[in-house]
DNA sequence: CTGTTAGCGCGTTCAG
DNA sequence: CTGAACGCGCTAACAG
């Protein structure tokens, strides 16, 4: 059929008239309500094929006006979009949203409450169906005002009252897993490098708790702690003097991959090899872990999955605190204590 | 005034009636069309204050139905959201969009044309005002179908006909800048590590061209090339044998920060120090550059700015190929050739 | 049973 | 400065 180019958009009225039915009937057919409306299969078929061949797409603005829903989910984050790998959360969330015909509206506050408030206003104005409140670091956040009765799921964070549904990595189990990797390799004396200082950041605390649990369960004393922040520079600055002072750890748990990178630098400076001299395990499962030489075994934050689960929880109206497992990504940084290689 | 809680939303009709005017008048006032409609200042003031105190917010779905605009921008990317630092583009784009009362609708195709098509459909259905087509790597892309007459700005990429407005980093000038840093430090023999192989990736080619230009302008012969991909592993695997074979470069340009990281690993293995033995400059300006020890001087991709410029170009209807400067982020990886430190 | 008429939702805008 | 129509899909009430 020549000249049948689908120029412009086709309205429901047009589909209806071409199919020789009313808008109402067309609407019911296309929304799958033929059963309760007892519409004849013949009519249904006709409407469907017309809609199909005309490339009919409902105008979501019009539908939205009526239904007060927009098939749109708002994602409000502090530093997720710009984050090194937390941004993967957006990928998982986007995929899950698309599977249900939804789309993501994003807004990054940069940690500014005023910006967050502005973002919320914009999203509410656009009638988002729900909001994902996301943080780059596992933490507690106060639910911002202005969301009204909108469904909210907090991802990688909880609010103080734990009143909302939340999706979090199981950091405590992750901590146990990290320690377990070293224990199973035969290590006994484990040193932990990293900070738990920032009071609103939960990850450090929980990871430490998990490590402590695993050691305790194995009948071992608590691990030695080297406080050295969360960063590459901090880790190097904290560990280098300690090592220069003669410390010779055999097994090191770094609380983030960045700390592991700083640790590698400090160890290399002393000529200590991974894993021959020191076994290392870290957290986050970021690309950094794989880039180190040898790659470091890391307990991964499942950002992708967190985003997807957050969206599903939102759309399915789930009411729960979801704890997602943190998979151990094996690297080449762990070995049995074996024979200690001596050199200077 | 007690009990004046702003429950639910206030409609324009309500504002109008409270102010004792028609919806029309209220609409004109709130849209700033008082001048052309010759509305009295008194009425204007009254409407404004009522709207303000009632916390009036227009229903964008309704407005959208009429105006066919949504104050929403679609961002369609391949691997930006999950990218290590290209995700910063979303931050810049979001900020610029918000400044103009717009919001970002994102969709990541993962490089799948089918997914991209689905995303486009969803965005068109939601009447986005325009689309930012973004790639994580500087490249050429064919404009996808289905966008119809929607304004499109390509960011970090161009289409083969260069028909659309595009925003790109000035990779060629960046290449010149990288070489310049080494030339100004007094280096003459420069080696380039990295790949230009992938035909659709422009960055490598342009960076190389810029480097060649700078060397040529300085009356120097072309740089030696070590092809070793774009990755940490690739760079290490490519450079280590070369160095073991006795090569002793004094100045190295790495085509990405990841290559620089691999280069550092290979250099360290040979006991070659940066910058005493080898000066290193790289590209991307990612966080990796700062984490290396010493941090590597890197020619940065201004992702943040690219996102912002892309949005502005879209909203202002700009028609041009924008080339953004790539700032040199100084690190501690460059020194004068000076006295060569010998050791093994 | 099968399908239609009619009005809603809310801001915008043309003709008064 | 106002009345009324409009954009488009949804759905309660109703007729063939």
Image (tube, coloured by chain):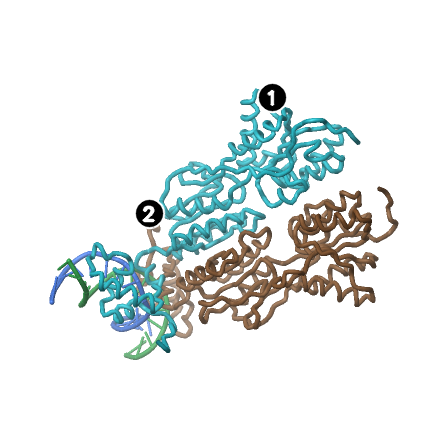
Chain colours: A cyan, B brown, C green, D blue
**Residue at horizontal 42 percent and vertical 73 percent from the top:** B35
The answer to whether residue B22 is visible is: no
**Is residue A275 left or right of B38 when viewed as pictured?**
right
Assign a secondary structure to mark 1.
Answer: loop
Q: Quadrant of residue B343?
A: top right
Secondary element under disc 2, as helix, strand or loop, is loop
Where is residue B313, by image quadrant? bottom right
* Mark 2 nearby-residue class (10 Å; few <14, some 14–19, many ≥20): few
Residues behind callouts 1 and 2 on a single chain = no
Tally of marks: 2
- CA distance for labels 1 and 2: 62 Å
Give the residue pinned by disc 1: A221
Q: Which mark is residue B2?
A: 2
Query: Residue A264 at x, y = what percent?
Result: 69, 38
Q: In the shown orientation, is residue A22 left or right of residue A99?
A: left
Q: Who is closer to the viewer here, D16 or A258? A: D16
Give the answer, above or below, for where B317 lies relative to A262.
below
Circle 1 chain: A
Crowd rating for badge 1 (residues with CA inside 10 Å; few <14, some 14–19, many 20+) = few
Residue B151, image x and y in percent?
Answer: 49, 69
Q: Which mark, by number, is residue B208?
A: none
Q: Camera-side residue: A25 or B99? A: A25
Q: Quadrant of the N terminus of chain A?
A: bottom left
């Amino acid at each position: 059929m020549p000249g049948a180019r689908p120029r412009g958009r086709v309205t429901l009225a047009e589909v209806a008239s071409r199919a020789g039915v009313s808008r109402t009937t067309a609407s019911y057919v296309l929304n799958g309500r033929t059963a309760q409306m007892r519409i004849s299969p013949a009519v249904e078929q006709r409407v469907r094929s017309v809609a199909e061949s005309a490339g009919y797409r409902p105008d979501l603005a019009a539908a939205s006006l009526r239904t007060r829903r927009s098939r749109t989910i708002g994602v409000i984050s502090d530093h997720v979009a710009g984050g090194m790998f937390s941004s993967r959360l957006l990928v998982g969330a986007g995929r899950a949203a698309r599977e249900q015909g939804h789309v993501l509206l994003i807004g990054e506050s940069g940690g500014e409450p005023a910006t967050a408030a502005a973002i919320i206003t914009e999203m509410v104005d656009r009638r988002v169906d729900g909001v994902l409140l996301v943080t780059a670091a596992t933490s507690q956040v106060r639910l911002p005002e202005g969301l009204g009765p909108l469904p909210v799921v907090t991802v990688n964070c909880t609010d103080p009252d734990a009143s909302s549904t939340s999706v979090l990595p199981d950091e405590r189990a992750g901590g146990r897993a990290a320690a377990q990797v070293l224990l199973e390799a035969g290590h006994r004396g484990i040193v932990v490098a990293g900070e738990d200082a920032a009071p609103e950041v939960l990850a450090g605390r929980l990871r430490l708790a998990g490590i402590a649990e695993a050691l305790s369960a194995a009948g071992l004393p608590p691990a030695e702690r080297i406080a050295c922040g969360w960063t590459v520079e901090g880790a190097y600055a904290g560990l280098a003097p300690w090592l220069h002072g003669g410390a010779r750890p055999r097994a090191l748990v770094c609380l983030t991959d960045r700390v592991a990178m700083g640790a590698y630098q400090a160890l290399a400076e002393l000529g200590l090899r991974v894993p021959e001299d020191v076994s290392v395990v870290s957290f986050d499962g970021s690309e950094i872990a794989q880039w180190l030489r040898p790659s470091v075994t890391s307990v991964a934050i499942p950002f992708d999955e967190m985003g997807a689960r957050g969206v599903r929880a939102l759309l399915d109206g789930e009411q729960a605190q979801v704890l997602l497992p943190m998979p151990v990504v094996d690297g080449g940084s762990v070995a049995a204590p074996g024979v200690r290689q001596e050199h200077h």
